[in-house]
Amino acid sequence: MATIRQRNGHWQCIIKRKGYPTLSKTFELRKDAERWGRQQERAIDAGQWMDRTEAEQTTLGDLLKRYSLEVSSKKRGADVEMIRIEALRRSKLALFSVAGVTSQRLAEWRDQRLEEVSGSTVSRELTLISHVFSVAIREWGFALQNNPVSLIRKPAFEKPRDRVLTEEQRLALLTSVGRCRNHWIRPVVVFALETAARRGEILSLRWDDIDMVRKVAKVSGKTGCRNIPLSPTCISLLKSLPRSHEGRVFPVTAETLKQAYKRAVDRSGIEDFTFHDLRHDALTRLAKMGFNILELRTISGHATANMLQRYVSIDAGDLAGRLAGQKISREGQNLRRVR
């Protein structure tokens, strides 16, 4: 039976059961203390009681910090995820205790966040928060009945971007990045345009990963490791670069690259062209050069053809031109046969 006593103007509920730690909690009102006592005793009787002390005393911000140190730091492309975590830690949601991050609070945060950024961004943030809770429950012993993210609706991802540069825009962009104060920005952009590699893959590339003889580079990213071919432009670029003491091919941080690239795009007069759009542009150009699906997947690292299709823009006008060319070729063959 729970013991209720008044102490220093507050009401304290104490529960002592054999085989369980002594439970106590203080409330402003006696009825709240009695209600809490009944809840704890029912959970003990049903064998469902869990020690929620750590979940109640740890904020989501603290949990995110632990996750970044113990989990994110061991991932490929950790820099990008850590930036996202730091942004989440600055949000009001991070001030709540882990136990206090309910599905209702998450839904309110989601709706407010949707007024600031795209649905795709919010969905990625919720996926990250969900994995943080999963690790906390399964591996760190946080006593939570469920993962609150699993109880709310995630925003739908927006329509895949379809941004490809014209030759004039590509030249304008390369000229603009060439004027960046940080002289590593242009080589990174050129490498991205030539290889369709992701930003994290490029920034984590080391000189030991480059095989100048075979003209391939071993990149590591969210889909694992793979070898990508290096064009003559890439080979020439790599030969011209100085070697950094730390061994990285492009010794620049993700945040520095992000800010410098954004300013360069603004200077070039190109609207709405992100760094990730370079991957889209590169794969589209490779497809036009005649690379087939299997070859493109080897280069891009996509698991399926459907995922690859989001990154390749096929122009119907180009297809019409190819059909016309095939028709003319067939007619020429027929004429030769007649003669």
Image (cartoon, rainbow, N blue to C red):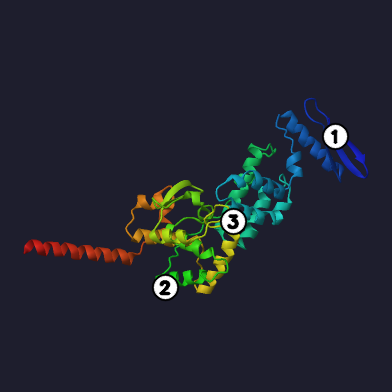
Residue placed under numbered mark 2 in the picture: 168
Q: Which amino acid type is marked by label 3?
A: Val
Instruction: Using the numbered discs, state the Cα–Cα distance from disc 2 to disc 3 in whole angstroms.
Output: 34 Å
Residue placed under numbered mark 3 in the picture: 122
Q: Which amino acid type is marked by label 1?
A: Ile
Q: What element carries label 1?
A: strand
Can residue 146 be spotted in the picture?
no
Quarter of the image for the C terminus: give it. Answer: bottom left
> Where residue 28 sits in the image (x, y, percent)?
86, 46
Outermost residue, top side: 18
Instruction: Give whichever of discs 1 and 3 has the lower sequence position.
Output: 1
Instruction: From the viewer's perspective, tell me whether residue 77 is left or right of residue 137.
Output: left
Q: What element carries label 3?
A: helix
Residue placed under numbered mark 1 in the picture: 14
Q: Give the image quarter of residue 310.
A: bottom left
Q: Which amino acid type is marked by label 2?
A: Glu
Instruction: From the viewer's perspective, tell me whether residue 136 is left or right of residue 227.
Output: right
Outermost residue, right side: 8
| Mark seen at residue 242 | none
Q: What element carries label 2?
A: helix
Quarter of the image for the N terminus: give it. Answer: top right
Instruction: From the viewer's perspective, tell me whether residue 335 is left or right of residue 79.
Output: left
